[in-house]
Image: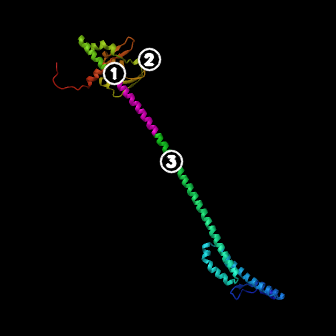
Amino acid sequence: MSLVKSMKNMPFKETINGATMNGPMIQELAKKLVEALNKNSWVLFSDTYTMMEKTLCDSAFDSLITPLQRIDYRSIIAKRRDVLKGFSEQCVLEAERERAGEWIDDVIDGKQKAEEKERQAEEQRRQKEEEERRQREIEAERRREEERQRQRMEQERRNREAAERKRREEEERARRAEESRRQAQRNLEEIERAKRKAKKKKNNVVKVLGVIAGVAAIFSDERLKQNITTIPDSEYEKIGLRGVTWVWNEKTQTLGMRGEEQGVIAQEVEKVYPQAVIMGSDGYKRVYYSFLDNLLVDKKQPKVKGKCRL
């Protein structure tokens, strides 16, 4: 085995600067030195030395500098000084030392930019998610407000309809009350006229009623009515009669009566107060309401205790 080949199997050796050289490196150095000596070239000998130092620097770079790529930039910054110090102990070439420092700085800068880019991307993603969440909340609140507005409008509509129904009902009750009042007034006037007439003729009330029945009696024949409905707690109950409401049928149109009305039924009155019912020439019974109203007035007057006057 030649000397050069034997050098390949040599153990690690340290240079004067403290750098380590393994067998292959020593073998390569020996080849270059032999080549330089054979050519008697000091320039080539110098280049061989530089190449040897470059090889040492590359080896130190691979073992000390390159692994920094696997850690985060904060750890690199923390280790930078010690790593470069260790690298300088194994690499005497100033250019390689500067290159190693620049490489570390480039790695730090690249990792910082990558982390910042990732941070910005994460921030943008978070802001996008926050904006989407906010928009969903705004949309949900808009739909809730629309529903509340719809419910308010619906409630207002129902309130207006209820108020309108109540107004119409009150108007109808007022109309009926006014009509009843006017009818009662007319009946009272008829009674007064009948009393005056009876006084002149010196006749009793029953005879007076018979005299004016044809004038004051009002259509109330059951045969002219439809949809007859009993009125609860009617004032006619005080005199033993049933108060009812009804709708005039088609037969009454020729008599000028139509629509809804209230009062009593002639056939029922006739059973209790026959003197208050008359038969018209048209074959329909009429009720003398003024007679009934007079009975109601008597019921309402309080009884006075004391001596009776003859």
What's the residue at 26%, 24% (across, down)? 299
- Residue 216: mark in rendering: none
Residue 295 image position (x, y, % from top left): 28, 21
| Residue with the mark numbered 1 | 183
In what element is the residue under mark 2?
helix
Q: Is residue 43 visible?
A: yes
In what element is the residue under mark 1?
helix
What's the residue at 62%, 67% (across, down)? 115
Quarter occupied by the N terminus: bottom right
Residue 77 image position (x, y, % from top left): 61, 75
Q: Which three-letter amino acid code belongs to the residue tagged 2? A: Gln
Looking at the picture, does residue 29 appear above or below residue 251?
Answer: below
Q: Which three-letter amino acid code belongs to the residue tagged 3? A: Arg
| Residue with the mark numbered 2 | 253
Mark 3 vs mark 1: which is more N-terminal? 3
For the magenta stretch, what is the residue range?
A: 156-184
Q: Are marks 3 and 1 in contact (CB under 8 Å)?
A: no
Q: Which three-letter amino acid code belongs to the residue tagged 1? A: Gln
What's the residue at 54%, 54% (across, down)? 134
Q: Nearer the viewer, residue 82 or 40?
A: 40
| Residue with the mark numbered 3 | 144
